[in-house]
Amino acid sequence: MGEAGESIDTSVPHPARRYNYWLGGKDHFAADRASGDAIAKAFPIVVALARANRKFLGRAVTFVAGEGVRQFLDVGTGLPAPDNTHEVAQRIAPEARVVYVDNDPIVMVHARALLQSDPRGRTAYLEADLRDPDAILKHEALRDTLDLNEPVGLLLIAILHFIHDDARAAASVRALIDALPAGSFVAITHGTMDFSSPEGVAAYEKMFAAGGTDVRARGRQQILGWLDGLEVVEPGLTLVSDWRADDDPADRPVSDDLGIYAVVARKP
Ligand SMILES: C[S@@+](CC[C@H](N)C(=O)[O-])C[C@H]1O[C@@H](n2cnc3c(N)ncnc32)[C@H](O)[C@@H]1O
């Protein structure tokens, strides 16, 4: 596994590998499966939500590329899965450039798969933490790949709920948005308990406090607050499976406990 492999601790569950497990991938270890099963036992909807989240990623990138954006900054890349950001974007615009960012060394090990760009476009990968947005913005790989004078599609898909500190999460979103020019877009998905009963919320809070889940659920207003000054794209903040979806609504997961919100906004 080389250098990256030395810092991988497979005895601790990791969001990227647990998500890969829920998506039906092969890149997970016993600790990831145990954590994934424990969360799915408390919230059986989580597997369907993970899959719906992944589909939203594709729809959001398609939408933003359709608006003429040719550069993407995908923070919280995850392990390669069908329809990675550059594959979706380059289907629409082969010249699209994508910078992937993740703090999981296992994603680094798989980065080669993410770097199979259409020769007309470009992809780069950098290992960094969303809690340190300056390190992302100043990174050579980003500066070499993206032109920050041109609009960028910023993707924060199923990552912000892993930052538990509210001020830190808000500051990270703000720093990245501030660095992008007018005409840029940001797409966010985020876990929420807004649809849960009070008993469900209490059970979630107990589980979170005991370390049983690392997802810090947040509410509609808090997520929209990050987008102050931006134009929220229609249909606004919705459940992830509803955002500009064209499948049968009857096939979508019903979030009566844990849900995932999705939103896309444009910087004017
Ligand atoms: C649930 S996965 C989502 C993957 C992909 N964005 C998607 O939606 O299909 C979350 C990813 O965020 C990464 N991550 C979590 N916290 C992070 C942080 N503070 N900085 C950078 N990456 C982080 C994890 O390693 C993982 O790959």
Image (tube, rainbow, N blue to C red):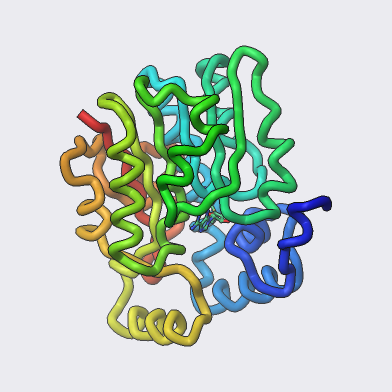
Residue 155 drawn at (x, y percent): 43, 41
Seen in the picture, residue 201 relative to 226 is either above or below; the reply is below
Q: How many marks?
A: 0
Residue 144 drawn at (x, y percent): 54, 25
Residue at 47% in and 43% down = 136
The quadrant in which the C terminus is found is top left
Judge by depth and name the residue closer to the eye, 11 or 91. Answer: 11
Displayed quadrant of residue 90: top right
Residue at 25% in and 51% down = 226
Displayed quadrant of residue 112: top right
176 sits to left or right of 135: left
109 sits to left or right of 36: right
Seen in the picture, residue 110 relative to 191 is either above or below; the reply is above
Residue at 54% in and 44% down = 101
Displayed quadrant of residue 28: bottom right
Judge by depth and name the residue closer to the eye, 125 or 191. Answer: 125
Residue 256 drawn at (x, y percent): 36, 68
Residue at 70% in and 54% down = 106
Judge by depth and name the residue closer to the eye, 231 or 49. Answer: 231
Toward the left, the furthest residue is 229
Residue 210 drawn at (x, y percent): 48, 87
